[in-house]
Amino acid sequence: MNEVKVLPVSEIYEGQCLHVNGFPFVKNNFDYEFTSNNEDFDHATNIVRHHIVGCCVVAEGSNEPRIRFDLTCGYPGHEEVNGMSGGLVLNVPCLGGTQYWVGMAVQVDEKNECLDFIPAASLIDAIKNYKKSTPKVIDPAAYLESEWSDAWLSAEGRQANLGM
């Protein structure tokens, strides 16, 4: 398998053509009325990957890169990209050029009609070193009282529940 090529932050520039990939909810419906002869299934879903091409802009007053769609396909609106968070942002290379991982889609800025992303170069160390990190529960509901919460939150409980 080829190594992922990460575009350095210094090579992300205004006007650069960027390609956002993800699975928007409007194209990936959940069918809870699904019927099957197999009792193991109680719903179905489509899995449709969607791609949108946009241009890199730099947010006013910061150095944060964003993606605008007005020069390409037009602003798709929040509904069309809702669910694409976490998706890949890639560059669109010239013919024969190298494609790089530029970043990870984060959120849509409705007011400015942009999609925010985190540059891949900012994420790569965290990804490479995730096994060295200290686990921390960040879901506030995880600490609510329940029959299983104490067992789950104990070290032994996590190991048993996660198959460790």
Image: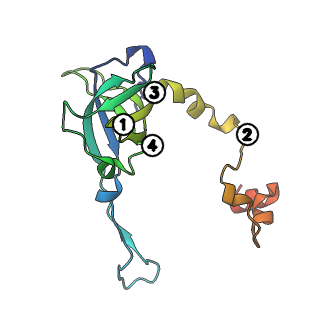
The label nearer to you, 1 versus 4, is: 1
Real-space Cα separation, disc 3 to disc 2, in angstroms: 23 Å
| Residue pointed to by mark 2 | 134
Q: Position of residue 12 (x, y in %)?
A: 37, 19
From mark 4 to mark 3, how far is it between C-alphas?
12 Å
Q: Residue 146: x and y, percent? A: 75, 70
74 shown above or below 94: below
Q: Which residue is mark 3?
A: 119
Q: Which sits earlier in the primary sequence, circle 4 or circle 3?
A: 4
* Labels 3 and 2: the sequence-earlier one: 3
Q: Using a 10 Å C-alpha cutoff, classify the residue at mark 4 as few (fewer than 14 neighbours), some (14 to 19) or many (20 or more).
A: some
Q: Nearer the viewer, residue 148 or 26?
A: 26
Q: Residue at x 42, y 41 (%)?
A: 107
> Would you say 66 lies left or right of 156 here?
left
> Regarding mark 2 in the picture, which secondary structure is present there?
loop
Q: Nearer the viewer, mark 3 or mark 1?
A: 1
Mark with earlier residue (1, 4): 4
Q: How many marks?
A: 4
Quadrant in which residue 38 is drawn: bottom left
Neighbours of disc 3 within 10 Å: few (<14), some (14-19), many (20+): many
Please say whether residue 162 is visible from this viewpoint: no
Viewport quadrant of the N terminus: top left
| Residue 131 visible in the current orientation | yes
Report how far apart the C-alphas of labels 2 and 1 lie in the structure: 31 Å
Residue type, mark 3 in image: Pro
What colour scheme was applied to this rendering of the protein?
Answer: rainbow
Q: Which residue is mark 4?
A: 86
Amino acid on which the number 1 mark rests in the picture: Leu
Q: Amino acid at mark 2?
A: Thr
Residues tagged 4 and 3 counted as in contact (Cβ below 8 A): no
Q: Could you tell me which quadrant the C terminus lies in?
A: bottom right
The residue at which mark 1 appears reads as 115
